[in-house]
Image (tube, coloured by chain):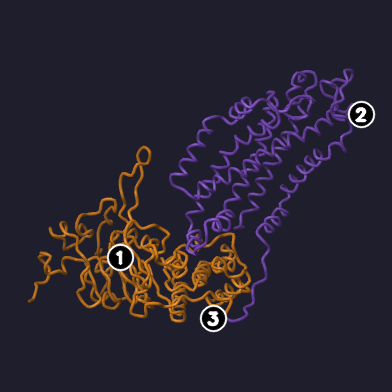
Chain colours: A purple, B orange
Amino acid sequence: MSPPAVVSLPPRRRGYWAGVARQLLRDPLTLITAAVLLAVIAAAVFAPWIAPADPYKASMLRRLQPIGTPGFPLGTDELGRDMLTRLIYGGRLSLLMGVLPVLFAFGIGTSIGLFAGYVGGRINMLIMRTLDVFYAFPSVLLAVAVAGALGPGMSNSLIALTLVFVPQVVRVAESVTTQVRKLDYVDAARMSGAGVLSIIRIHVLGNVLGPVFVYATGLISVSMILGSGLSFLGLGVKPPEPEWGLMLNTLRSAIYVNPWIAALPGVMIFITSMGFNLLADGVRSAMDLRR
Amino acid sequence: MSAVLPTQADRGGPAQPLLRVTDLSKHFAVRNGLFGRVQQRVHAVDGVSFSVAKGETLGVVGESGCGKSTTARLIARLLKADAGEMVFDGDAVGAYGGLALKDYRRSLQMVFQDSFASLNPRLTAIDTIAYGPQVHGLSKAAARQRAAALLARVGLAPEQFGSRYPHELSGGQRQRVNIARALAFEPRLLILDEAVAALDKSVQAQVLNLLQELKAERELTYLFISHDLQVVHYLADRVMVMYLGRVVEIGPVAELYAQPRHPYTRALLAAVPSMDPARRTDQSPLSGDPPNPINPPSGCRFRDRCPHAQAVCAEQVPVLRETVAGHWAACHLDDPRSGHAEAPVLLS
């Protein structure tokens, strides 16, 4: 048999991600959330240009000024440094602590989970039971233990946080892969004679990445809070670096004197982590194809 | 022609079966207990032998769990057989020096029961069909062109349906896409594993007619797995009846439906709903569930549900015997030498 020489092809459909983007644009809550997050991120990135003062310049005369003090719109901290400036600069490290470990864990965890889920059997069991060891510890304790063992410092706390999230991402990636692997379309792809890598790339990855991505987005806020916790305990960023968790720590003695100032870094952590969570929810519903 | 995969040549001539399966077995280990030790084995397919002639439709029937689908997956090599061999048009499958797996898989394609689960939700109809030819070296444009032609052939206008995702198609349309995907490989054998079972009757009829047309047009051979005896009657040339992982009867469709030899086949046929009031009965032709395949009965596996069971049925495994030309059954009732009291007396 021979097919007719020319058959009219359908017009190219917008890709999947274009559809997701279009859906996101129709969701006002997600748009507002994204705008707030974007403002926080932009403020952190462009901190040297928009911050009104020097984040390290202290003054013993202006300690713990209240919100609204002329020249210091959000007051000053326990060493007389401008709070607004420190909050803007603090976003740099806090966001880094939130996003980087999750990004690393997403890459490492998805690869391990895909492999374990696709191969199955004994290898899967070996990998998953090994990772279960990490589940024996509460994540805060694990992060503290790893960061404590590696010693304080920014990069060590990044490693500690990554280690905390890898098993969680692996578990989600593995369970989704195992489900997808059992579906007939993967069998149909195997029957096409395609190689394992092609099957994983085209038929498995595309259907696994979505749920894992959404899960990982939700981890950003956890990572930020854990990172702040490490700094609070003195295991992460060291003073005088501005970082929200660390600021919360150093201001805690001022909580009876000027509670509003002491709460400000917490407010920033709350807004940002809430933002990432809402964004994850919005992306999740936008990625659902059957709507 | 550049847009077509080379058709696979007929090698052995029309008399050589397209597929010959010998003693195919698959036992699934049931893992439980501490450390997942293998404690029991499910005898899903046990020593199944049959052959499929070129250009025929072999219907495979049996109740759920009898090993129909496992047999299909073993033939498709989606599962690895524990024992048995397969010969595809004279070439051993999977053996050293035999047919390469990639070529074998191209020669044989499968359409699954669940039309939704068998389509990647992230690929459009055209992309799904074009994937296979691309794997086999066609350019993307040529593969898409070919996919569009096949989509048109199975009755879906490519301009309208080509860019739809599976969730935007109806069950019948999805199954047409699945058929087109299978055809894109230019297969010689198409395994239809309950391919129309999930469709409603009118759509089922349309898809069955499409399958008949395609078969004639492309000289296909079908292995048609179904639990619907009427559909098998309509489509098949020969019928194979399976029970608990074994073949109990195999024969030409008219002959087998008119003169079933195995008590199980008789019970199955008696269970078919009839339009004829005289044939209706309140009596259930079979009682009880099929036995647990973990511990199948000794001897004949049907014996604990069989009205004719005798001592010999528990002792000896009945083998397939040719009673009438081309009609084989595995029952002691049929064998004068078996020692079964109801067996015909040997005339000699």
Q: Is residue B185 left or right of residue B296?
A: right
* Residue shown at 51% from the left, 33% from the top: A133
Report in which chain the residue with disc 1 lies. Answer: B
Disc 3 versus disc 2: nearer the observer: 3
Residue B51, percent across and down?
32, 71
Question: Is label 3 in a helix, a strand or a loop?
Answer: loop
Q: Disc 1 designates what residue?
A: B22
**Number of residues whose C-alpha sits closer than 10 Å to that of mark 2, classed few (under 14), some (14–19) or many (20 or more):** few
Q: Identify the amino acid type marked 3.
A: Ser
Residue under label 3: A2
Q: How far apart are the two marked residues, 2 and 1, measured between alpha carbons?
A: 90 Å
Residue type indicated by callout 2: Gly
- Name the side, left or right, on which B68 lies relative to A278: left
Discs 2 and 1 carry the same chain letter: no
Rendering coords of residue B232 (x, y %): 36, 73
Q: Residues within 10 Å of mark 3 (few under 14, many from 20)?
A: few
Question: What residue would you read off at disc 2?
Answer: A71
Sequence-first tag of 3 and 2 = 3
Q: Chain of mark 3?
A: A
Give residue B7's position: percent from left, percent from top: 49, 76
